[in-house]
Amino acid sequence: MSDFYEQEPGYQPDEPVSEPEMQPEKKKKSIIPWIALSVVIGIVIGAACLWGGMRIFGKTQQAMADAPAYQVEEQPVTPTLKTNTGDKTLTPAEVYQQNVGAVVGISTETTAMNVFGQKTSRAAAGSGFVLTTDGYVVTNGHVVSGANTIKVTLNSGETYDAKLIGTYSASDVALLKIDATDLQCVSIGKSSDLIIGERVAAIGNPLGELTYSMTVGYVSAVDREITADGKLLNMIQTDVAINSGNSGGPLFDMNGNVVGITTAKYSGQTSSGMYIEGLSFAIPIDDVIDELMELQKNGFISGRPRLGVSLQELDANTASVYGLPVGPYVQGVEEGSCAEKAGVQKGDIILALGDTEVDTYNQLVAALNKFKAGDTTTIKVYRGGAEHTLTVTLDELIETPQETAQPEQEVQQQAPIFSIPGFGDFFGY
């Protein structure tokens, strides 16, 4: 017991410790042989460790030489988008219950100038859907075009200020971001799998007031080309009821996957007096999902070609009156653009781009979209009674979002410069 107490410095036992009994002194032995033996053993062990270490180092070096160079794993732009699998046998009610929480309302405010030169505010409404749980929201580009403010309202009633990340005008889509997390998001399907006669459903905010309404119909056609706001768009045609306020909302298949973005409808009467019913259109999700991912990463779509000209349609009647060929009429040429460098002039009529002959603005856009920025091709123009073939290296079209629109710029209208009857709308490309 005394031994234990002696290991505790400063502790004194209650009982005194007796003095140890004296022992006769023993003869001391020499420690030199032990020191020598220790040195020999140390040398042997050290040599063995050195030999083993050199072998390990050699193997490590060989393994490093044989292994590929280290690369940092590139993180995906967004979390992996989910997809629902199945036989498309959900009922519309099941699709609604599954997805209404991921559908949003979009409200915007723009500034315009009235006929008296006064600035006025104008509100607009549309629909959208949550693409990712961290707050990326998809809608139509025309829903947020020129907006001073954008607000996103969830199905729960929560409203957030939204930032415009980017737009892709060629397909009329826009990507927004709200400061929210753990949101319910949609599942993404494949529009290329749609067949005519298949049932589809839309959820949105028709008229901006009938919030989170559902309409159901069928796929009437796929890969239908229509012209909207001067753009040639590939669309899903459906008889699902689409009204003002539905723009930008999701179109679902019966697995509850988004297969399209509701965008437009035809209504009213034709020039012959026929009424138009049940003609609605949605952007195929396959056509824009990669672009949406790039918008999230860069804020714009890279590689898009641009000529740098403003155009007006020259229709057949007008061309006949003035003895001109039919084609897009060059209204103006942007200074420093590839068109100017190629020798395109104001007053030229574009007849072909590359190997594609063009008669209309839409045909020219379609021909242009076959190229990428930086490509070199030919452009054929009519000028002074003769055709000229020019070589052009295409510029890049970059659309950058404006967080706050400039009212003065927003309300300026392009004054008609031509008075020739039959000329269509003004286009810039």
Image: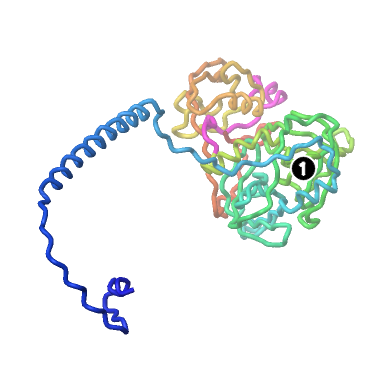
Is 73 placed above or below 182 here? Answer: above
Is 24 placed above or below 47 here? Answer: below
The percent coordinates of residue 85 (x first, y second) are 75, 37
Left or right: 397, with 38 as reference point: right
Left or right: 27, with 52 as reference point: left
Q: What residue is at 64 percent from the left and 37 percent from the top?
A: 289
Magenta-colored span: 301-327
Q: How is the image coloured?
A: rainbow
| Residue 263 is at least partly visible in this image | no
Instruction: Verify whether residue 304 appears in magenta.
Output: yes
Number of dots carrying numbers = 1
Residue extending farthest right: 274
Instruction: Verify whether residue 8 appears in magenta.
Output: no
Q: Mark 1 points at which residue?
A: 256
Q: What residue is at 66 percent from the left and 33 percent from the top?
A: 287
The percent coordinates of residue 224 (x first, y second) are 76, 29
Inspect the image, locate mark 1, and give the three-letter code of the amino acid beneath it: Gly
| Residue 26 is at least partly visible in this image | yes
The percent coordinates of residue 211 (x first, y second) are 78, 56
* Quadrant (top left, top right, bottom left, bottom right) of the C terminus: top right
Left or right: 398, with 260 as reference point: left
Say what secondary structure mark 1 lies in. Answer: loop
* Quadrant (top left, top right, bottom left, bottom right) of the N terminus: bottom left
Closer to the camera in the image, 384 or 381 = 381
The percent coordinates of residue 3 (x first, y second) are 30, 71
Q: What residue is at 77 percent from the left and 42 percent from the top?
A: 256
Q: What residue is at 67 percent from the left and 34 percent from the top?
A: 231
The quarter of the displayed image where residue 383 is located: top right
